[in-house]
């Protein structure tokens, strides 16, 4: 059974990383405009670059459901993926869904 958590819980517990080397335009921003954390596209170049910074079980996949609502899953997803994120804290291989 998958564990479901909110985006706020995900941010607090898993600590998405801000990776300055990814360059401008790859950062999600806080309300004040400062970088919050980095996202990676699903291209091979972005994936390869991301994996230089990812430790085991620290990659998350953003997806959209059938109603175009975003959600994330732990791990590297290869189907219906939009982008990837790297966290400081490992999800330890647990199947986790992040939504809401």
Image (cartoon, grey):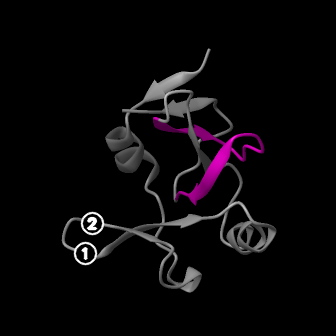
Q: From the top left corner, tell me how far across and down residue 19 is, in percent.
A: 52, 76
Please tell me how crowded label 2 is: few (under 14), some (14-19), or many (20+) other residues with Cα within 10 Å: few
The quarter of the rendered structure image containing the C terminus is top left
Q: From the top left corner, tell me how far across and down residue 74 is, in percent.
A: 62, 40
Give the Cα separation between the discs numbered 2 and 1. 5 Å
User: Residue 6 is drawn in which quadrant?
Assistant: top left
Magenta-span inclusion, residue 25: no
The circle on residue 91 is none
Q: Is residue 47 above or below residue 98?
A: below
* Residue nearer the viewer, 5 or 63: 63
Q: Could you tell me which residue is drawn at 60 percent across and 48 percent down? A: 60
Please tell me how crowded label 1 is: few (under 14), some (14-19), or many (20+) other residues with Cα within 10 Å: few
The quarter of the rendered structure image containing the N terminus is top right
Q: Are circles 2 and 1 on residues that touch, CB within 8 Å?
A: yes
Q: Could you tell me which residue is drawn at 68 percent across and 69 percent down? A: 50
Q: From the top left corner, tell me how far across and down residue 14 is, in percent.
A: 46, 49
The circle on residue 30 is 2
Q: Is residue 49 above or below residue 77?
A: below
Q: Look at the numbered disc 2 and give the secondary structure of its residue.
A: loop
Q: Is residue 44 visible?
A: yes
Q: Could you tell me which residue is drawn at 50 percent across and 37 percent down? A: 71
User: Residue 66 is drawn in which quadrant?
Assistant: top right
The circle on residue 33 is 1
Q: Residue furthest left?
A: 32
Magenta segment? 69-87
Q: From the top left corner, tell me how far across and down residue 29 is, in percent.
A: 33, 68
Q: Look at the numbered disc 1 and give the secondary structure of its residue.
A: loop
Q: Is residue 58 visible?
A: no
Q: Could you tell me which residue is drawn at 57 percent across and 31 percent down? A: 96
């Amino acid at each position: 059974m998958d564990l479901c958590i909110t985006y706020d819980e995900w941010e607090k517990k898993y600590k998405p990383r801000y990776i300055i080397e990814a360059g401008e335009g790859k950062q999600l921003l806080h309300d004040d405009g400062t970088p919050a954390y980095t996202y990676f596209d699903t291209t091979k170049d972005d994936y390869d670059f991301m994996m230089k910074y990812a430790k085991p079980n620290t990659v998350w996949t953003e997806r959209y459901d059938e109603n175009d609502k975003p959600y994330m899953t732990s791990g590297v997803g290869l189907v219906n993926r939009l982008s990837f994120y790297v966290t400081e804290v490992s999800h330890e291989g647990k199947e986790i869904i992040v939504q809401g």
